[in-house]
Amino acid sequence: MRRWLPWLVLGGLLLLSRPMATTTKKAGKRATKAQHARARELATEAFAQVYGHAPSLGERQYLQAVACLETTYGAGWRGDGKGSNNMGAIQAGRPPCNPATSFETRDTHADGTVYRWCYKRYATPLDGWVDLVRVLFKKREGVRALAAGGDFMAAVAEQRRTKYFEAPLARYQSAIFSCLRELSDALGEPLAGGVPRV
């Protein structure tokens, strides 16, 4: 879990800045247009590998927003996490970590308690995306169904209910909304389901 930068209420929406990372991720790092485009290709290919068909616009956008928020498409890691191809901050278990398949880093519980944990390491970016599809959608079909319908804020609530993250719901919803707008602008496409209410 990450600590959050100051928030802003605009037009009735609670908007948060990008997450302020713990010691393993670069604070405030934003994805480039090229990173968004490449992430779109990999997210689409990974989803097709897991499900056998192309994702809907909502599934693609939500999958990408989670990876953008959690790790800036894998580029936000530093230290031992750099080059791990871990797109969704997917955990591997308690230390000690197997350096061939994971790396140890610190994270923060919702109550602010710092802990150390192992996070998965993948051979390629596509491998990291495939596992994100499995962990976020295949193990959480409710999240996938809501994302497919463009109900992104309900998808975040289901993602939290199923313990993908611990952050306060409104904070994560606002951060996902920011990522959705960022990738929508970068890729020149409308948001599936319209503009979500936070």
Image: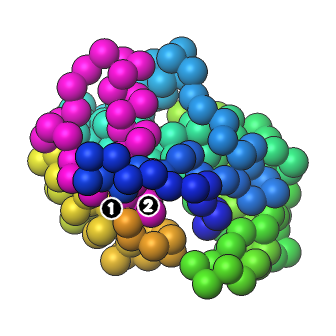
Proximity of marks 1 and 2: CB atoms separated by less than 8 Å:
yes
Question: Which residue is labeled 1 in the image?
Answer: 156
Principal secondary structure, stretch drawn in magenta? helix
Q: Is residue 80 left or right of residue 71?
A: right
In the picture, the quarter occupied by the C terminus is bottom left
Question: Which residue is labeled 2 in the image?
Answer: 172
Q: Is residue 115 left or right of residue 190?
A: right
In the picture, the quarter occupied by the N terminus is bottom right
The segment highlighted magenta reads 171-198
Label 2: few (<14), some (14–19) or many (≥20) C-alpha neighbours in 10 Å: many
**Residue type, label 2:** Tyr
Q: Residue at x 60, y 32 (%)?
A: 30
Q: Which tag, 1 or 2, sits closer to the chain's start?
A: 1
Residue 58 point in image, percent of width and height: 22, 40
Name the disc covering residue 57, or none: none
Does residue 155 lie above or below 116 as drawn?
above
Res. 142 image quadrant: bottom left
Magenta span has 175? yes
Does the rendering let one see residue 52? no
Depth-wise, is mark 1 or mark 2 nearer the camera? 2
Does the rendering let one see residue 35? yes
Label 2 element class: helix
**Residue type, label 1:** Val
Magenta span has 160? no
User: Marks 1 and 2, Cα distance to the nearest angstrom?
Assistant: 7 Å
